[in-house]
Amino acid sequence: MQKNTDPTENITRQLADAMRSNHEPTLQKLYTDNYYKIEKYILNNNGTEEETKDIYQEAFIIVWRNVQLDKFTPGNESEVAGYLFNVAKFKWIDHLRSNHFKKIVHIEYEEGPLEIIEETINAADSNKLLMVRNKYKQLGSTCKRVLTDFYFHEKSLKAIAAHFNWTEATARNNKYRCLQQLRTLLKT
Amino acid sequence: MPAAVKNLIENLILEKENEITPAEFDEIERYLLQQMSDTESAAFSRQLNDNATLSIKVDDTRLLLLGVKEGMLAEKMKAFHLALKTAQPSVSDLWIKRYLAAAVVFALLILGSWLFFSRNGSQKMYSDYYIQDAGLMTVMGVSENYNFDKAMIDYKLGDYQKAIDAWQKLLITNPANDTLHYFIGSAYMALDQPARAFKNFEWVMKSVKSNFKMDAYWYAGLSLLKQGEQEKASNYIRQSDNSKKDELLARMKLPATNGD
């Protein structure tokens, strides 16, 4: 049984709920409102626009993930902004400290416990999530639509079936097959 | 039996054991999405404690579904980013509204300026000589100057603050760019913030080879005139190449430039 609430209906819902249910206007607003502050920080610290985008999107996923896992429950947008900035900042520092980064740079930062700010899951799980994200890109458009509607937009199987002119049982089977296809891709 | 074949068979058996059937998946999914009743959920949790294989399957599915959602978010972010970087003003109706808004702002500025400057000598002169820089030609298109051009259109339409905000973002990567400073200064002049305008013109005047240098002297002088600092203003106006500089210096009752 899916949640009955349509995420677009109640725009006054709490921010954490909106993030948990992937209310798209909320996610887009958070993404847009916080991007330039982080861009400024990274560009001022030897980064490029492309690197900014990658670091920012990684940080955004981490913040979103921690909301999904109930590890972070923001009360307002400022809390998301602060957390997102810290995660992006430490991700960037981590990047500069990495072995791949050979340039000697001066960077403004305070020492901090990166692992506390950034990760709430272990490295193996983190790698697995990254692999799933990458393999997900290879799924066909129908599979992506079925899975997105069910898991991201929390639509019912009935609504998905109606969209594709399927029966509910077919929608359920196809959802399972799409995930099996993804499991197979993960083994390659 | 050779060891390699034995390993292969063992792996196949293990894989088969870990395979999740549709019925199993339904149950695991209902557990993870918290769609089970309390009793059912408690019973399933007990099964998890007793059945290591089931526990692995649940963990595996939990990560898979989270990863799938992250994949979806990553695709959404692509669209968010594109919108962020290429947000364009919509056509026709928005343009008409903007032109109307710009016309109203312009009319109010003219009326307000006339009422205000008529009371004050310096400011009267300022209003007589200040003509806003018309801006640069722009071609809307996909180019690295797109953001600059877009802001230039805002400037020309009278949305000076929006233009300033956009140009200041570009300054982050081009802090010494004379063109950006010149037009930020011009926009501040249009917003009636002469002190801020002057600071930007100062950058341009310090640039050795700026094409805007002469104009920057002129507008820097006018910005000081607007603030009532006639003597300081004259130093800048004198260094400009504006055709009306001598006329203005004469009105300020200050010596005109030599040789011009």
Image: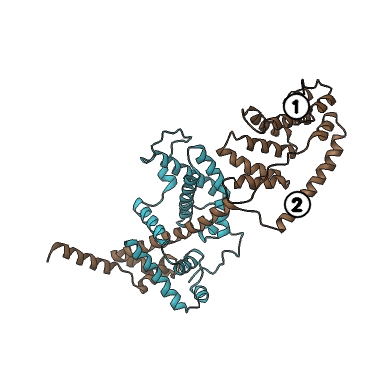
Chain colours: A cyan, B brown
Percent position of residue A169, x then y = 44, 78
Q: Secondary structure at mark 1?
A: helix
Residue B67, by quadrant, is bottom left
**B191 left or right of B34 in image:** right
The residue singled out by tag 1 in the image is: B237
Q: Mark 2 or mark 1: which comes first in sequence? A: 2
Above or below, B109 against B239 in this view is below
Above or below, A102 against A123 in this view is above
The span from disc 2 to disc 1 (Cα, nearest Å) is: 33 Å
Q: Residue furthest front?
A: B259
Tell me the amino acid under the disc marked 2: Tyr
Tell me the amino acid under the disc marked 1: Ile
Q: Which residue is drawn at the image coordinates 53% and 51% (left, top)?
A: A74
Q: Which mark is residue B99?
A: 2
Position of the C terminus of chain A, as image quadrant, is: bottom left
Q: Which residue is drawn at the image coordinates 45% and 58% (left, top)?
A: B70
Q: B249 or B163: nearer the eye?
A: B249
